[in-house]
Image: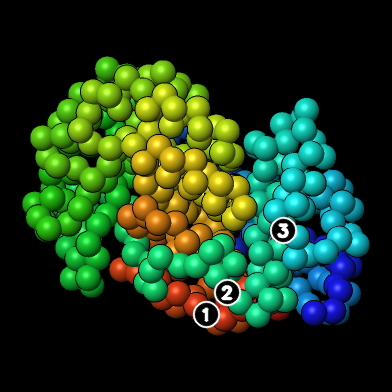
Amino acid sequence: MLQVKIERVDTFVVKLVPPEAYLGAHPGEAEGGYFLRPPWRSLYSSRFETVLTRITCSDGSYGWGEGLAPVAPEVLKEIIDRLLAPALLGQDPRRVRPLWTRLGGLMRERGHLVGHQADAMAAVDIALWDLAGKLHGAPVHALLGGAFRDEVPTYVSGLPRPTDAERAALAAEWAGRGVRAVKLHLGNGVKEDLATYDAVAAAHPDLRIAIDAHWAYDLSQALRLGRALDERGAWFLEAPLVPEDLAAHRELAAALATPVAVGEAMRNRYEFRAWLEARAVDLCQPDVGRTGITEAMAIAEVAAAHHVPVAPHHSVGLGVMVAAGVHLAAAIEAMPALEYQPGTMAVADRVLTAPTVGGPVSYALSDTPGLGVEVDLSQIEEHQ
């Protein structure tokens, strides 16, 4: 194989307007700004905002990456352009893990593995894996050691309807399409959350049902909710408490039969290791758009050493991130399901020349070299 070097790193801020049906009634949601969705505390955008990265080599080969940037994607672009790209130029793109170490060291005493710095590194890392796969003529899952499955199972995340009756009806529709599991985005109060759970469970008793509480509860409330979910045989309880409170999660996990799921706020193996050693998590949920593929695989190995499964998180990442998540999920042994966001998938493929292969039940595994997706540059230029 001819020696190739990284010659160019391009970054693109993308902001896609979602379908009208996706927009809710929250102030600012339809006006193109940022807004809150009480009781959730996080800031949201009325658009799908992301950062795409293209790494090009001296022989013309290239790879695409994407970093999770639901708000302020311009921050990630600046980090990539100013800090990461100069360290990549002239490097061998096939040395993905050594380059990850090189990039992590650039800001070691300045939050190098967390926050926006980690999100920017994730975009670059995904692009490097895509590029390495193309150069080796192999899909990313093969470079990761091989796939444990040819079809990556998924669960439907969210039933965005205003009433429990409408949520139950939507759950029944998904079940009719072969969906076997759903996650409810709640945190509206213990009594209210249980009423929603019961309505959905009654609509289709065979569905596995999880709850994402969006960090809404204190420990006493989470214990009440979790014990009630124990009685109902819930699949898992995600983000029940604020993400910085490891001790409370440990107490909660010890008290419940329902698995406690966390991980979307974490970005590296060291954070996950602390939670795993404390037995504060029963299901790890790293997001490849925040961890990159390299670190996500390291997280999966740490979780495996503690006999804890990994169900990769996915929220507002577009087509490149979806593809990265599928390759990652295929290469993890104890992987019950990958998150499938219907709202996100309504726009995710708009940045690709061809849609991802899969749906609400599972994703077919691609054998195309790299990630198996190609970005539509005309769409990128139109929505910057």
Find numbered disc 2 in the image and state the secondary structure of the residue it sits on: loop
Q: Which mark is residue 299?
A: none
Position of residue 142 relative to residue 213, above or below, is below
Residue under the image location 22 percent in, 28 percent down: 256
| Residue 99 relative to residue 161: left or right | right
| Residue at image mark 3 | 96
Amino acid beneath label 3: Val
Position of residue 359 relative to residue 85, above or below, is below
Position of residue 35 relative to residue 143, above or below, is above
Find numbered disc 3 in the image and state the secondary structure of the residue it sits on: helix
| Residue at image mark 2 | 139
Amino acid beneath label 2: Pro
Q: Nearer the viewer, residue 111 or 213?
A: 111
The answer to whether residue 18 of the structure is visible from this angle is no
Q: Nearer the viewer, residue 1 or 351?
A: 1
Q: Quadrant of residue 253?
A: top left
Q: Position of residue 243 (x, y in %)?
A: 47, 29
Distance from Cα at disc 2 to Cα at disc 1: 5 Å
Distance from Cα at disc 3 to Cα at disc 2: 14 Å
Q: Position of residue 71 (x, y in %)?
A: 62, 46
The answer to whether residue 310 of the structure is visible from this angle is yes
Residue under the image location 20 percent in, 53 percent down: 208
Amino acid beneath label 1: Asp
Q: Residues within 10 Å of mark 2 (few under 14, many from 20)?
A: many
Q: Quadrant of residue 194?
A: top left
| Residue at image mark 1 | 367
